[in-house]
Image: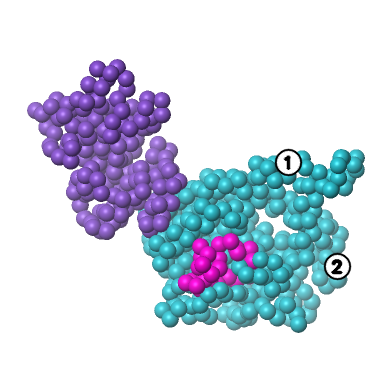
Chain colours: A cyan, B purple
Amino acid sequence: MNATENIKKIIVEKPLKLDCGKTISNYPIAYETYGKLNEKRDNAILAFHALSGDQFVTGTNPITNKSGWWSYLVGPNKAVDTNKFFVICANVIGGCMGSYGPNNLDPKTNKKLGINFPVITINDMVNAQYNLLDFFKIDKLFSIMGGSMGGMQVLQFVANYPDKTKTAIPIACTASHSAQNIALNELGRQAIMADNNWEKGDYLNLNNSPDKGLSVARMAAHITYLSQKGLQEKFGRKLQERDDLKFGFDADFQIESYLRHQGSAFVDRFDANSYLYITRAMDYFDLIKQYKGNLSKAFKDSKVKFFIISFTSDWLYPTSENKEIVIALNAAGADVGFIEITSDKGHDSFLLDVPDFLKSIKNFLEANY
Amino acid sequence: MKKEFKIISELIENNTRVLDVGCGDGILMKYLKDNKNVDTRGLEISKNNVQICISKGLPVIEGNAERDLQQFPNLSFDYVILSQTLQAFYNPEKVIDDLLRVANKAIVTIPNFGYWKVRLHLLLKGTMPVNKHLPNEWYDTPNLHMCTIKDFVNFCKRKNINLFKSLALHEEKVSMINKKNLNLKNFFSELGIFLIEK
């Protein structure tokens, strides 16, 4: 049996006008759910995944056979308790886990779309996923949550649909992608496009794949998810299965071997063109500009209860950028809580076993449910 | 709930918006929310206390009053509360200015350094006073700018801040402070509670 048959999908007939100007319709949104929707239909949480995530939040991912990306947070008796809450997560459009993306077939040519796929934005992703509320007949979500790009989707969702969620938890994110983050994404894209096997984006139709480029992109990105202290403590200058330096370019150091492994494991589950499209969507994200320079207008008259979380060692989406969101919410008179969690695990903290983080979310959800 | 918080809550009208600066574990915020239908916000420097407030469903942000008060727009609250923390700021004057920018009215409480036991401690023992309201030793105290009730009254006068209500607290007993009894209250009270406005 093909594992992709386990992917649940809705086909959205309603046309969606994208920010780039194109309109799409009859496109698939792949999703997964955990827990049960209660009779009052008021216990639903929409989780948004980050750049390299997918709809398989917890349990075993049926495609990769690895644990879901938010297994520490979401599950029975966990901080986001699926005995109590109904958790929905969709693969973003532009992704490669069943939703409308560059690996879809173009019905006109019967070839994979590749870079004929339209450039999408965070706003487009959120508007596409909104259709899941209609599908599940949910009038109002109990909460929306996400870290990194997932957090950007949380902010965009509240701005677009202020009455459709009771609470919102943007984690380790920003309201406006910084020059540093655009630069780092560009590095990844250039690595992919510099690989000859990328074939100008047409590799899927030529049975090729830019594994080296995607792998380098992932290696570079992975460094940005960690912290200097975390790296030093975990790897230091430890050597990889050898007693001394080999005076060559093999992976002498454990950190090199670790990154190479991260890179090669990633190409098995991720599409290089999706990586281009999703990083582009992140770079284009600027909620401040969308509201003409005044972020608090995005949250004007919002009745949503916000809880913003950042991490001390996150230099990719630092506390200062998260605090800008808090400031805008306070300026709008919104109901907002904020905490900076102490952690050496860098940006990745939101995916890891960081007890203070898990406890914060649990407490916030329980106090407001 | 301690007497000081009871008195503060009595100074606050129902159905108002209140910012509690240094809200601690949120006891006063929760009381105001539950009993006076007050729309509260909190600012708190301790991560642990922020966690406790979040678990009570209170909207509290982690931050430092000297740095983070500026994010609140002018007159975005009816009241702002500052309980026994004025003395811990680098620049108390600026904090008071900011409080009265953010809200019409501010409720400020201060541990009174003019209390007779404090004076006697320094006079007789010759060491920095340590008591219920000043529990730390000189080397580990967060307090940088201790003042007396009289100092604060004079400060408000100098800055043209209207002392709407001045109360003295001593052993759970509250009394009004006025011009005539200022020296007496300054001698016999552990805590001063002031409702001020610009």
Q: Residue at x 78, y 56 (%)?
A: A261
Which element carries disc 1, helix, strand or loop?
Answer: loop
Image coordinates of residue A123 in percent, x first then y, are 56, 64
Residue A28 pos. (x, y %): 64, 77
Considering depth in this image, is B129 or B79 the residue closer to the camera? B129
Q: Earlier in the sequence, mark 1 or mark 2?
A: 2
Is any atom of residue A359 visible in this view? yes
User: What kind of residue is marked 1?
Assistant: Gly
| Local SS, label 2 | loop
- Residue A315 vs A291, above or below: the answer is above
Q: Which residue is mark 2?
A: A208
User: What is the quadrant of residue B183 in the picture?
Assistant: top left
Discs 1/2, front: 1
Q: Is residue A190 left or right of residue A131?
A: right
- The residue at 51%/52% (across/down) is A356
Q: Where's residue B87, x and y in %?
A: 33, 31
Prevailing secondary structure of the magenta residues: loop
Q: Is residue A357 toward the left or the right of residue A271 in the image?
A: left
Q: Which residues are magenta?
A: A68-94
**Residue A118 showing in the rendered view:** no
- In this rendering, is residue A226 above or below B94? below
Q: Residues within 10 Å of mark 2 (few under 14, many from 20)?
A: few
Residue located beneath label 1 in the image: A236
